[in-house]
Image (tube, coloured by chain):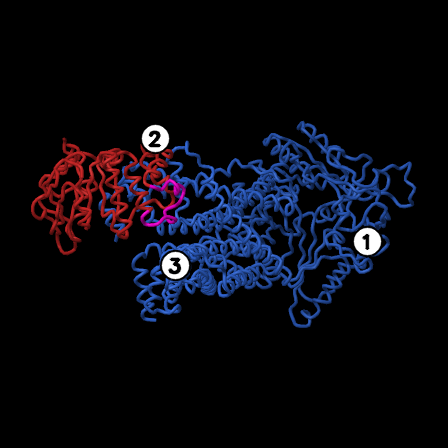
Amino acid sequence: MKFAARMAWRDFRARPSRFLLYAAAIAVGVGSLAAIESFRLQLDEAIQGQGKNLLGADLVLRSIRPFNEEQRNLVNNWPGPRSKLISYRTLLLHPESGQTRLVEVEAVEGNFPLYGGISTEPPSAAVNFHGAGELLLDHILMLQMGLSRGSLVNLGGQSFPVAGAILQTPGEVPARSLMAPKVTAPLAAVDEARLRSPGTMARFEWSLSATNDSQLSRLPQLSMEARALGLEVETVAGRRQQLLGGTDRIGRYLGLMGFTSLVIGCLGVAGAVHFFISSKIQVIAQLRCIGAGIFKAATIFILQLVCLALIGASLGVWIGAVAASHLPSLLAMFLPVPIHGVLRIDAALSAWLVGVVFTLLAGIYPITRIRKISPLISLRVELVTRRSSMDLPGLTCITLIVLSLFIYSWHQLGTVKMAGAYLGGLIAVIAVLAITGHAIRWGCRKAVRPGWPYVVRMAASGLYRPQNQTGLLVVSLGLGIFLLNTVDMLEQHLLKDVDKTRQDRPNLALIDIQVDQRDALLELFNSFNPEKLYVEPMITMRLKEINAIPIDRVDQVTGQSRPNWALRREYRTTYRSEIKHDIERIIDGVWFDQERWTSEFAPVSLEKGIAEALRVGVGDHLQFDIHGELFDVEIANVREVEWKSMQPNFFVIFPVGIIDDAPQSILMFGQLEDVNHRAEFQREIAINFPNVTAIDVSLMMNTVSRMMEQLSAAIKTIAWFTLFAGFMVLFAILKAGRHQRLREGVLLRTIGAPGRFISQYQALELLLLSFGAAISGLLLSTAGSAVIVKYGLNMPFQPDFSSSWVYPVALGLLTGLVGWYTALSSTKLNPANAWRRISI
Amino acid sequence: MHNVLSFSNVTKCFSSGDGEITAIQDIDFELGAGMTCALLGPSGSGKTTLLSLAAGLDDPTSGSVAFEGTDWRRLNEDQRAAVRLERVGFVFQSFQLIGTLNAVENVAVSMELLGRRDALIKSGEILARVGLGHRLHHYPSQLSGGEQQRVAIARAFANNPTVLFADEPTGNLDHATAGVIIDLLFDLNREYKTTLFLVTHDRDLASRCAMTLRLKGGKIDGDIKSARAGGLP
């Protein structure tokens, strides 16, 4: 062992910088893993630590209609504390500046929330706003509208002073308030009667808490009863699960990206060990010749590998500490509870362990080759070039690596299917990139013509340099580009989709319009000369039966499962006689034809998606409950709807003459292109029609775009780690091949090549290589994105390559610069000195 | 006959950890065009240093080395490279072929650098001349030592140089192969009328040269022996 340690130390001493570069490649991967794992654990702990504060109660009962008598009785019979909340969206007007903004109002009783509290500035505002009849406003909204404590705002036609700013509500993701910032108002101060009127889009909630064990034990029974009465029930565990589910998913995917950068580092290590052993074949053969056993020879390399793994993983922990301090701020918008950017010891340890294990696994495989190095090679050099086939230990090693990768992916993603998909995808991408690497070399050799500039031909021949490890470089750099461009392309498609909803389409939606306000509002809207205007009645209803089977039993009876949201949602429907040909298309059945309709049931038109979710089609029967009155209908046709049209669209449409008298409200969607017109129109609405909510769709779409960009930036930050790891591998490989390049450069210099020529061809060689890596990464990511966009996002794949050129150009320039710099040493050195250096 | 190479009172020192080492000292000699010269001496006597100075690969500590009447020190690195490209050929003991180029491409390097369009055709012809017409597209790793050295010789003669510097050209070859290589060197020397400057341990090889320089401890040992000054062997 002493002998092996001494030999290992001598090897390290000869090239410490190369060793450290490989360690850095490992460190980048371990660092990103440690930071992401720490972030996940901290978030989990913070969410768990909030306990009942997350919900503010032990149980929340919710409905989008005012509670009926039975439901009210259920709440009234609860012996413990309870609190009422009504939330709705409306326009907030600042009369002084004339600004309006869509807000989500939470009108609450004095004891809300039952657990925890709202964090406000000043802190006393959270308690005092009830008595004073004041409002609490989201702190960002106050900043945007230039409001301060005491400012007067108008809400639903009433004037309120501002009591203070809401800083944080446990269990709520800040991004949510960007769409409609939150305003908390005393329930006593709002017009509850108006909110209870039919068609008003409000949410009614009762929070209940238990003060003793007996009450706690009654909660499950109460939940069941509430569900039976059609109420939505949320528990602390449910809220926690929902929050953990969302954030955990982001964490897991980020974790896999971090792991991918570790895989790149490991590939670099495997390549390095392979190359190192190849360059030491003679030495190993000589050692074996003079009596060193296989184990002794292998120990020299194993010791170096262990040191590399330990140093790389330990360096990674330091990188992780830096990354961990920045990650929470990148994702702050999506965090339901604030967390501090500190690297956790357990996360650091687990990432360190993963780094060490995978580095060892990656390096061991090439070390198994030592067994095949014959002592005879020291006498017969030609035996070096003999290729050996894979044997049992090599096969075992490969199996172990794939198995470990699978187990780790499974641990990260939670399901075998997802782990298989990740690993399969990763192996496929690596394989394609490796093949591309070979193809680049082969193609360069075949494509290059004698008439081409000599510098180009020399650069192409350089790709064949044995120490170049072209395949490994293409994989390392290509994988980083693949990830970055895939994130870019997905973001591009999602943003394009959002943009589509902004182009030449309605950008103002008026909801909660009472029937008697219709004409006056129409007159107001028309006075602004809208480019487009659509008006439709809206009636809410619930589904009771499918083909005479109650929805509670329909899955059981038919043996088919249907999503809960489709069965129990509140259907917002309309009635009309004409189909809108510009946004609707019948795909089955025929549009309403009263004269030919022979069924005893009223006909309805169903949207394709909801028909699929309910597993019904033309001829099937449904029963709807419209404010207590039951309507049996037959599906006359199934429609395909272009939901992105931003016109009022509905799952269910009735013909005229069936539900026209049911309680209803009016929807108005219009297009006002001028932003000042929109603002003025919203002001008029807030002043003259305080019960009507005007939603500025453009503003919401801008917010959605901003959120997507923020999430994409967070994901890309991690994806950059993979490219950094690739660069570390590139530098290490250049360092490893430096001797060969220097020798080549000095030889050319000796026989008379100008220094410029040597720099040019060595830079061009790397440029060709990195350009090839980037192009293959881009092509692969285009193919991968096409699959995700088409089958995952259900969108047409329309790639926009206008920004993709940045990657090959930037990568090409950077690596070209590195090549030019490394060539400088052979051109700047005095040739005689260089020859001496080479021969040492 | 003009002088191709002139050493005038040349000394070259290297600094090392223990102080300064004098590799060669007070060297004075001249080499006429078309001459053949062997540089003999034991290991460490300064042979390679002298060769480096002669080819403008290094600068003397004192004295001057002139190539065709121009002191190497008056030229910068790129100018020296340009001179070597057109007027100098090299043959190394360890062949020094570029592993990523095949035989014909290796020979073509200096012609390609000069931008000659017929570089590959011409290299093929030279390779055929050195007996490797059937090995044009073989890579160095696919050639034997003797074959590699023949490629190196072909490369050295490719630009029809004024001087050919050969650093122990047979040092890595067996006796029989070495004989073939020496014959080839002298044959080409006659054909191309090149000045030949050989560094060697081989007395037989040295005896075929018109002029012999014997180095010992960095100095010329004894007189410069000229068998047939100015003549070809």
How dense is the environment of label 2, judged by Cα within 10 Å: few (below 14), some, or many (20 and up)? few
Residue A357 drawn at (x, y percent): 46, 64
Residue B165 visible, this orientation: yes
In the rendered picture, chain B carries what hue?
red
On residue A277, which mark appears?
A: 3
Name which of mark 3 and mark 1 comes first in the sequence.
Answer: 3
Q: Which residues are magenta?
A: B131-146
In depth, the one of A58 and A91 nearer the eye is A58
In this image, A169 relative to A449: left or right? right
Tag of residue A544: 1
**Same chain, labels 3 and 1:** yes
Residue A576: x and y in percent read 81, 37
Answer with the quarter of the image where residue A248 lies.
bottom right
Q: Mark 2 = which residue?
A: B116
Residue type (three-letter) at the residue carrying disc 1 = Lys
Residue A606: x %, y % from top left: 79, 44
Q: Chain of mark 1?
A: A
CA gap between label 3 and label 1 equals 73 Å
Q: Nearer the viewer, mark 1 or mark 2?
A: 2
Q: Position of residue A86 (x, y in %)?
A: 68, 52
Q: Is residue B87 above or below residue A62?
A: above
Q: Is residue A66 above or below residue B3?
A: below
As measured in the structure, the alpha-carbon distance from the residue carrying label 1 to the one carrying label 2 is 90 Å
Q: Amino acid at mark 2?
A: Arg
The chain assigned the colour blue in the figure is A
Magenta run includes residue A101:
no
Contact flag, marks 1 and 2 (Cβ < 8 Å): no
Q: Can residue B134 be found in the magenta stretch?
A: yes
| Closer to the camera in the image, B157 or A122 | B157
| Residue A126 appears in view | no
Pick whichever, A74 or A426, lies toward us. Answer: A426
